[in-house]
Image: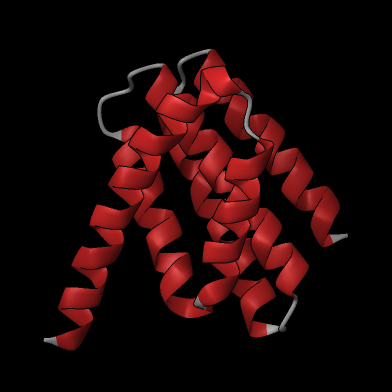
């Protein structure tokens, strides 16, 4: 059931990016993050990993479209999920990167740079 919900949300997120509905894309990412947080809470590692990769996919697509703030908001969403899940997200991104085709690598790296910046900010704020 969780996987079907995530698949539907991914489709909505990707479609909203392709049709340039940034707000819909952001809200969809927020919903995926909430499903991911529930998966973390219930110790569902596969679903947590899938949620992270779907958020990454939407973020990569937003970066490709050169959306203004959406990639950063998506990066922040996934950084928040990383804080609560730890290594699951890092592993998911490693696996995701291995599956990318060459034309997608640059936009993925741009998105990952934004993600790492947002994650660092969250970690710094948490330690203060």
Is 78 located above or below residue 58 in the figure?
A: below
Left or right: 69 in relation to 74: left
Q: Which residue is the extreme one toward the left?
A: 128
Q: Residue at the location (78% across, 51% down)?
A: 5
Figure quadrant of residue 18: top right
Is 6 located above or below residue 128 in the figure?
A: above
The foreground one among 108 and 18 is 108
The spot of residue 6 in percent (x, y) is 73, 50
Figure quadrant of residue 45: bottom right
The foreground one among 116 and 31 is 116
Q: Residue at the location (59% across, 64% down)?
A: 91
Is 117 located above or below residue 103 in the figure?
A: below
Q: Residue at the location (41% across, 16% down)?
A: 65
Left or right: 79 in relation to 32: left
Number of marks: 0
The spot of residue 29 in percent (x, y) is 52, 46
The spot of residue 109 in percent (x, y) is 39, 37
The spot of residue 31 in percent (x, y) is 57, 53
Q: Which residue is the extreme one toward the bottom?
A: 127
* Residue 49 visible in rendering: yes
């Amino acid at each position: 059931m969780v996987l079907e919900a995530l698949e539907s949300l991914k489709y909505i997120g990707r479609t909203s990016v392709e049709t340039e509905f940034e707000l819909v894309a952001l809200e969809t990412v927020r919903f995926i993050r909430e499903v991911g947080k529930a998966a973390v809470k219930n110790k569902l590692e596969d679903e947590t990993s899938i949620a992270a990769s779907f958020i990454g996919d939407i973020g990569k697509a937003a970066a490709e479209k050169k959306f203004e703030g959406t990639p950063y908001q998506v990066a922040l969403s996934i950084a928040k999920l990383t804080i609560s899940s730890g290594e699951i997200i890092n592993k998911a991104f490693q696996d995701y990167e291995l599956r990318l085709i060459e034309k997608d690598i640059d936009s993925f790296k741009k998105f990952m740079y934004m993600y790492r910046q947002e994650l660092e900010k969250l970690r710094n704020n948490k330690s203060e």
